[in-house]
């Protein structure tokens, strides 16, 4: 359901850190709490090329497939015991040992706890984390995210997104030198809500067209275990 909901967007084309209350702006989603923190994630595993073509079908394949169908845990793929199967296994092992290990990626985690205040199931949620410079309220840095969710009416859910971008770009030298407290204010805003019944709520001063290309990139690659992606 989540994958289908995210794909439809193409057609429309812990917790160290600070926390506080969100901005409702008439939103059907209530922001209960939010925080950000530095984080490190494992890098993407490099793809390995296909080592050999698929082995030819042998007579034992029929028994193996039949055992698999009856969920026999002892069933062993007969191709693993053929010369081709052993050679492919060895070459794969050598290739993996020579492949560069993925390096960890330093970034930032953005977390928000929300509640669905409507009477409908939410499937897609657009939200943003804002950093507002205390010495100049006109200077705002926005980190926007898209989440595939399934939030039932009146239920709460914690969302987490990883981004390479943090709040540092919003802090000027004047803010750091002239203030003893927090150099920036923070808030979370809900920009758009898409429901399971196909209806949409959108914040009146937010424009979907401005993030259309970013949404296409976010949902254009396979969606893994993550719930949210940055725009």
Image: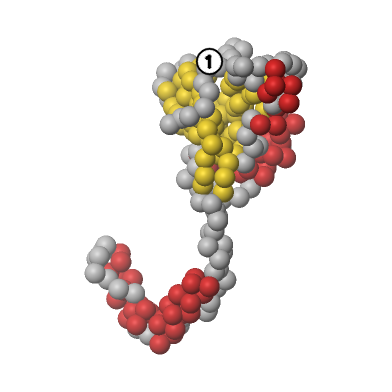
The residue most toward the top is 26
Q: Position of residue 14 (x, y in %)?
A: 43, 31
Q: Position of residue 108 (x, y in %)?
A: 56, 37
SS assignment at label 1: loop
Question: Is 196 situated above or below 153?
Answer: below
Q: Position of residue 18 (x, y in %)?
A: 53, 23
Q: Residues within 10 Å of mark 1 (few under 14, many from 20)?
A: some
Residue at the spot 53% in from the left edge and 62% down from the top edge: 101
Residue at the spot 24% in from the left edge and 66% down from the top edge: 72
Q: Please tell me which residue lies in front, 67 or 100.
A: 100
Residue at the spot of label 1:
21
Quarter residue 189 falls in: top right
Q: Position of residue 48 (x, y in %)?
A: 55, 68
Quarter residue 183 falls in: top right
Residue at the spot 38% in from the left edge and 79% down from the top edge: 79
State the count of labels. Answer: 1
> In this view of the protein, can residue 60 be seen by the observer?
yes
Q: Quadrant of the C terminus?
A: top right
Residue at the spot 45% in from the left edge and 75% down from the top edge: 93
Question: Is 77 situated above or below 172?
Answer: below
> In this view of the protein, can residue 204 be seen by the observer?
no
Colour scheme used in the picture? secondary structure
Q: Please tell me which residue lies in front, 224 or 110.
A: 110
Quarter residue 153 falls in: top left
**In the picture provided, is 163 more to the left or to the right than 204?**
left
Question: Is 62 situated above or below 179?
Answer: below
């Amino acid at each position: 359901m989540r994958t289908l909901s995210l794909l439809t967007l193409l057609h429309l084309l812990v917790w160290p850190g600070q926390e506080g209350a969100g901005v409702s702006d008439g939103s059907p989603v209530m922001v209960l709490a939010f925080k950000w923190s530095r984080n490190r994630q494992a890098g993407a595993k490099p793809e390995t090329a296909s080592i050999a073509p698929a082995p030819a079908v042998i007579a034992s394949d029929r028994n193996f497939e039949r055992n698999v169908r009856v969920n026999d845990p002892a069933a062993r793929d007969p191709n693993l015991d053929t010369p081709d199967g052993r050679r492919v296994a060895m070459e794969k092992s050598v290739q993996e040992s020579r492949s560069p290990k993925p390096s960890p990626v330093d970034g930032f985690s953005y977390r928000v706890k929300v509640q669905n205040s409507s009477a409908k199931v939410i499937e897609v949620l657009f939200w943003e984390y804002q950093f507002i410079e205390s010495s100049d309220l006109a200077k705002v840095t926005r980190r926007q995210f898209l989440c595939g969710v399934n939030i039932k009416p009146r239920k709460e859910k914690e969302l987490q997104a990883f981004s390479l971008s943090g709040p540092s770009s919003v802090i000027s030298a004047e803010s750091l030198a002239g203030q003893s407290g927090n150099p920036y204010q923070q808030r979370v805003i809900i920009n758009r809500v898409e429901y399971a019944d196909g209806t949409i709520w959108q914040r009146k001063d937010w424009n979907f067209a401005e993030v259309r290309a970013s949404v296409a990139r976010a949902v254009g690659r396979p969606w893994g275990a993550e719930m949210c992606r940055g725009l």
